[in-house]
Amino acid sequence: MKQQGREGVSSKTLDDKRAVALLLVRIIGDLPIDLITRKDARRFQETALKLPPRINQLPKNQSIETIIKEATATISLTTFNNYVKNLTTFFSYAIREGYCERNPFDGLRVKQRGKVSEDRSVFTEEDLRRLFSKEIYTSVHTKKPNQYWLPLLGLYTGARLNELCQLYLDDVVTINGVDCIHFRASRPDQKLKTASSERLVPIHSKLKAMGFLEFIQKQRVAGHARVFPELTCHKKHGYSAAPSKWFTRVREQLGFKDGEEQKDFHSFRHTVADHLKQKGVSEALVGGLLGHQTGGITFSRYGKDFRPEVLAPVVEMVDFDAEQWLR
């Protein structure tokens, strides 16, 4: 863990790996690493797949058997495969350092029958109409600006929640005559998922019509440095800790609960990607908008990021009319 910390792995990722290692101990016992067998790994698999989501939030003194008995839902295959991924990393390090000779979790990932794209559901237009209703948004417009703007920014940029929460006012820029949001990690309290996540995203005309640029100017006049100065930086979750909890409450209120259709803030990202895909936009352009490296070796090695004036028409193809819904 310390070595990965020195290599720049985020504290959240390290905490996730530590939590999986502790879960392994809870399930198979505190064994010396060189005595953990394939049979133990299979036992972990059989048990973990019966566990509910967010097990780390449950009482530590509650037995695994009781947790499974009282579970009303189980973790997804994606979550389990992430467990295996983290344990594989752990054992690979142990093998390299001579603590053990083999990885008992090698090849233990569960093959998913459905498409990866189905793992999180997109918002339907009816979902969005309910979410961007006047009743919800009128009450938060002035009290908590982040609760008003974050879902709208998610809908019209496809950006990740923390990418939006950590924005500074100087990340809102004009390049080649195009108003943009520069998603970057230029400060110690800003983090991106990957290097390719840095990008310039043109600001949608709908956001401008709803007063986003005027809001940015007011924040500047008020002397703020950040777009949402009311948010505080959490060591593990960055600036998105409070907004994530708030949006969880909103989605549960609207019926967007965990289950077969997982709809959360990240669903905005999937919604934008699917919306543009259905309109025939190339994968490379969608990747440029979302910060995904989708090109082959020629594009990724020798190509440059898309210019804002190239992405601007793509952004405008996201034609949901939230402005109309809010009237």
Image (cartoon, grey):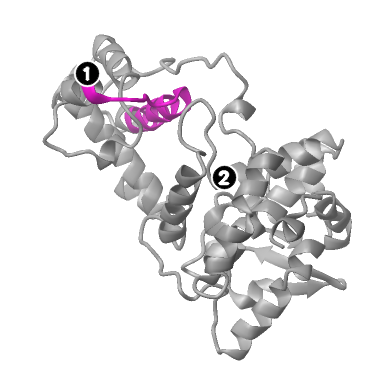
Of 174 and 271, nearer the camera is 271
User: Could you tell me if residue 221 is visible in this image?
Assistant: yes
Spot occupied by residue 131 in the image (x, y as percentages of width and height): 60, 50
User: Could you tell me if residue 293 is visible in this image?
Assistant: no
In the picture, the disc for residue 256 is none
61 within the magenta span: no
Q: Amino acid at mark 2?
A: His
How crowded pointer 1 is (Cα within 10 Å; few <14, some 14-19, many 20+) is rated as: some
* Side (left or right) of 281 relative to 48: right
Q: Amino acid at mark 1?
A: Ile
Q: Which residue has dot 2 on it?
A: 266
Mark before the other along the chain sequence, 1 or 2: 1
Q: Which residue has dot 1 on it?
A: 36
Examine the image and state in which quarter residue 114 appears. top right
Examine the image and state in which quarter residue 326 appears. bottom right
Magenta residues, dominant SS class: helix
Q: Which residues are magenta?
A: 69-92
Secondary structure beneath label 1: loop
**Residue at image point 62% right, 90% down:** 221
In this rendering, the count of numbered labels is 2
